[in-house]
Image (cartoon, rainbow, N blue to C red):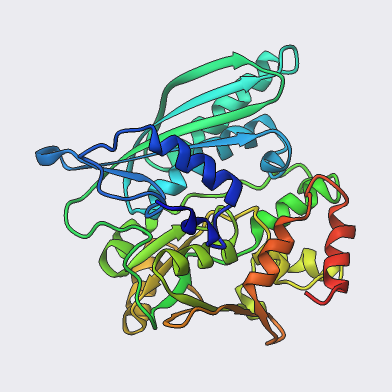
Amino acid sequence: MTSVDWTRLYLDAAEGALITAMREGMTRSPRQLNAAFEADAELLDLGAAGVLAMTVDTLNDGAELATAPTPYAKGWLTTTVSVSDLAAVAADPVAVLVSCSLVRDAWSAEDARQFGRGASDAAQRYGCHIVGGDTNWAREESFTSCAIGTMRRGHLLSRVGARPGDALYATGRIGAGNAAGFRGLALGRTDDGQPWLPEARVAAGDALRSYARACVDTSDGLLNAAVSLAEINGLGVEATLPAEVYDPAAAALADSFGLPRWLMAAGEWGEFELLYAVDAADGDRCARALAEHGLDAVEVGRLTAGPELLFFDESGARRDLRDVLPQMRAIDPAGGLLDDLQKLLARGV
């Protein structure tokens, strides 16, 4: 990997440079099937034993945990964030490990019990269990999960494989994560005692194995996910986001503050849906297959042969993602979030 790779919009240059330096000191496994950033999970060929999928994610105190205000919600999110990566490669979850860094004297035994219950309830929802982990004291709270799954031989689903003209679909309506983060940081409140519990779309596996050409989860937001799929495949994107693609709570929140709904797709608190590319001719068939598992396919655009990274908002206005996303990332979500968003809009973004 060269430094040129860090010109991609979906990658953070500083973080990417560190990742490159780390990888330069590592020996690549001969069993690994994916290159860096080509899949949400790392894929290992175990020969006759099949294909193993593994992923690890850390949630740090502050903005990353803004959507999880209770210990139960933190446990649920800790499991979900890594299992969602397994879902994006259509893997079947087997087990999850959880590591907790806690601030001494800040957690009670009941808090810990509720965290464990949330993490376990989420794992069982996805057909697996928490099997162990690690706990230690730290100056800042953080939670890490490692999810392990298996994949069926045949079509391996990753971020790579999309083609020009492919339709882009999400496995559900978008914006719920950004709405939860906005409520937590900008408004200092949650959903009236009912925290948002996002669900990893493990149930989409059969349909996506049959029809999808490439897939990524939307844990960093829908528009970031769309750019990721486009750039890793050397393509452009035209995301189309009419008013009806948004989660009802996200739409209502944006409307109540006079904010455009597209902000609920541009922020980085993702909703953990899957964004997949499919041959336009197979779009309806894949949607029907997802419906059999209780999931609603929502069309959100297409991939293009050209280099443009665009989206069309609920008013039909055309916007350049190379302009919008860097400015969104420059906002400190722990600062004056509402004021910063309003200033962003005043600049004509």
Q: Residue at x 46, y 21 (%)?
A: 133
**From what the image shows, is residue 169 above or below residue 103?**
below
Name the image quarter holding residue 136: top right
Asked whether, in this view, residue 333 is left or right of residue 257, the answer is: left
Name the image quarter holding residue 112: top right
In percent of width and height, residue 64 lies at 67, 42
Q: Residue at x 76, y 49 (%)?
A: 191
In percent of width and height, residue 154 lies at 17, 57
Q: Which residue, as the protein is rendered here, is positioned at the far left?
A: 48
Q: Which residue, as the protein is rendered here, is positioned at the far front?
A: 3
In percent of width and height, residue 111 lies at 68, 22
Please tell me which residue lies in front, 206 or 349: 349
Asked whether, in this view, residue 152 is left or right of residue 271, the answer is: left
Asked whether, in this view, residue 240 is left or right of residue 123, the answer is: right
**From what the image shows, is residue 154 above or below residue 192?**
below
Please tell me which residue lies in front, 128 or 279: 279
Does any portion of residue 297 appear in the rendered image?
no
Q: Residue at x 35, y 53 (%)?
A: 89
Please tell me which residue lies in front, 62 or 10: 10
